[in-house]
Amino acid sequence: MPAPERIPSRSLTGTDPVALLTEGELTVLGQIRGASNAALYCTVARDGEEAACVYKPVAGEQPLWDFPDGSLARREVAAYEISEATGWGLVPPTVLRDGPYGEGMCQLWIDVVPEDDEAEGTGEAGEPPLLALVEDEEPGEGWKAVVRAEVGEGRTALLVHADDARLRRLAVLDAVINNGDRKGGHLLPASDGRLYGIDHGVTFNADDKLRTLLWGWAGEPLTAEAVGVVERLAAELAPGAPLVTRLGELITEVEIEALRGRVAGLRTTGRHPEPSGRWPSIPWPPV
């Protein structure tokens, strides 16, 4: 979740969410606690349609020395563009627009299905856990090992994530966009069974910055589906292609060229990337 507490959402039916986010009237209702940059909970309304959304103004961003160009908001929109190009729809609808505090990212709010243990006694169906700490040496069936972690008092546990096709697609997307901050709290299972990833401000760096909790498939062959997606991305990232034109308004030419290089690398190896070993591969804090 993007904050320790979720705020009740408002459903969206019968309209184009991108058009609503872009053209609707944005009303700020409050600030999302726990976010490292300004993140505001809002409603957006147009022609009788209303939806909840998150608005992150550029003016509320904390400067990052290794992301000196552009803004985190534009990188979030670029991540949505790549997500849409894959056909997987892993990032909620996200646009760049003006708002009460200036230009910023505006993203559709996703209501999250609680995990099984959190849903007990509520009458709601719970989502199977996506991440877990186990005391076993090896992951059980249906799980992939990430790393052995210290859990206090000299004890360690194995961090695992579900061997879930939705997570695996997200791992491929993260490798493409060079996500430097894929934490557990950035995974949003929705009521329709889809899984979304959020908080993509630290992406598209020209240097390798991949930090994620989804290393379970590291070194394994890409699925046939993922190979097809990577091939399609390579074509859509050709100079002059419409996707490149849109990305050119969001990230730098150097970053677009690095993006092409990552896609080419995936095509060449046909495998999920592995940690480089040159810097921490797990984001901190991991949640």
Image (spheres, grey):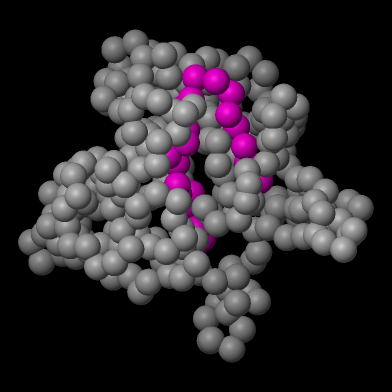
Instruction: Say which residue appears at 68% left-offset and 58% top-offset.
Output: 131
Judge from the rendering whether residue 200 lies leftward or rightward of residue 141; answer left or right: left
- Rendered position, 56 above or below 34: above
Please say whether residue 202 is one of the residues in the magenta stretch: yes
Please say whether residue 90 is one of the residues in the magenta stretch: no
- Rendered position, 199 above or below 115: above
Q: Position of residue 215 (x, y in %)?
A: 70, 40
* Placement of the C terminus among the 4 image quadrants: bottom right
Judge from the rendering whether residue 193 lies leftward or rightward of residue 268; answer left or right: left
The foreground one among 69 and 111 is 69
Q: Position of residue 207 (x, y in %)?
A: 55, 20
Instruction: Looking at this view, name the residue that lies furthest to the left.
Output: 47
Q: Is residue 80 visible?
A: no
Q: Position of residue 249 (x, y in %)?
A: 26, 25
- Rendered position, 112 above or below 86: below
Which quarter of the picture shows residue 248?
Answer: top left
- Rendered position, 262 above or below 239: below
Instruction: Say which residue appears at 45% left-offset and 51% top-offset.
Output: 36
- The segment highlighted magenta reads 188-213
Q: Position of residue 228 (x, y in %)?
A: 53, 27
Q: Is residue 203 visible?
A: yes
Judge from the rendering whether residue 202 lies leftward or rightward of residue 223; answer left or right: left
